[in-house]
Image: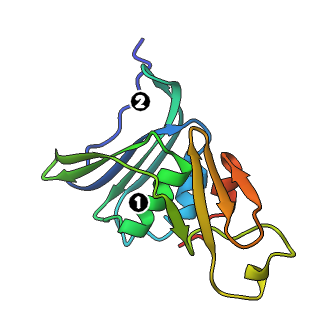
Amino acid sequence: MDTDMKVQKLANGYVIDHVPAGNGLVLAKVLDLTTTNGGTLLVGTNLASGKHGRKDIIKMEDRTLTEEEESKVALVAPNATVSIIRDYKVAEKRTLRIPEAVEDLIRCPNPRCITRLEPRQSFTVEGTDPVLVRCRYCERTLQGNEVGENIVPG
């Protein structure tokens, strides 16, 4: 019995692979992938992975990622790889890096933080495995899934 799931190849687009299991839907929300411009969107969750045991994957047809979106991916899934697909082939494969500082991508969850009154958000990245960021204004730290939950969508 064949238990492998078959997924159609992309002609052009992006594949975000090696997303930690359970974070694919968080990443889809963070990237606002509800609007696909008519292209195929696949979010696979809890898939078998030789390297990580279980993983999630996102395939987006006819869509590109901005530098800001790539930073968001790195914050939610620091070990993810991004493949750029052109004419059904992997044209480029990238391992994303978490930036040293994060500006206006994460909202501080501290209700007393001055950023609640100001439009500016600024975090320093203090760790990458797991991701650990600190608000530059109130010193609140966020770690792992808490980072993904507070990323500004879109």
Q: Identify the amino acid type marked 2.
A: Met
- Could you say which quadrant of the image residue 139 lies in? bottom right
Q: Is residue 148 left or right of residue 62?
A: right
Residue 101: percent from left, percent from top: 52, 64
Q: Position of residue 72 (x, y in %)?
A: 50, 60
Residue at position x 19%, y 48% from top?
92
Helix, strand or loop under label 2: loop
Q: Contact, CB < 8 Å: mark 2 with mark 1?
A: no
Q: Is residue 139 left or right of residue 2?
A: right
* Residue drawn at the location 64% of the way across and 49% of the way down: 132
Name the secondary structure under disc 1.
helix
Is disc 1 surrounded by few (<14), some (14 to 19) or many (20+) residues within 10 Å? some
For badge 1, the amino acid type reads Glu
Q: Quadrant of residue 39?
A: bottom left
Q: CA distance from mark 2 to mark 1?
A: 27 Å
**Along the viewing direction, whichever of 140 and 19 lies nearer the viewer:** 140
| Residue located beneath label 2 in the image | 5
Q: Residue at x 87, y 76 (%)?
A: 112
Disc sitting over residue 70 in the figure: 1
Dot 2 or dot 1: first in sequence order is 2
Query: Between tags 2 and 1, which lies in front?
Result: 1
Label 2 CA crowd tier, 10 Å (few <14, some 14–19, many 20+): few
The single residue placed furthest to the top in the displayed view is 1
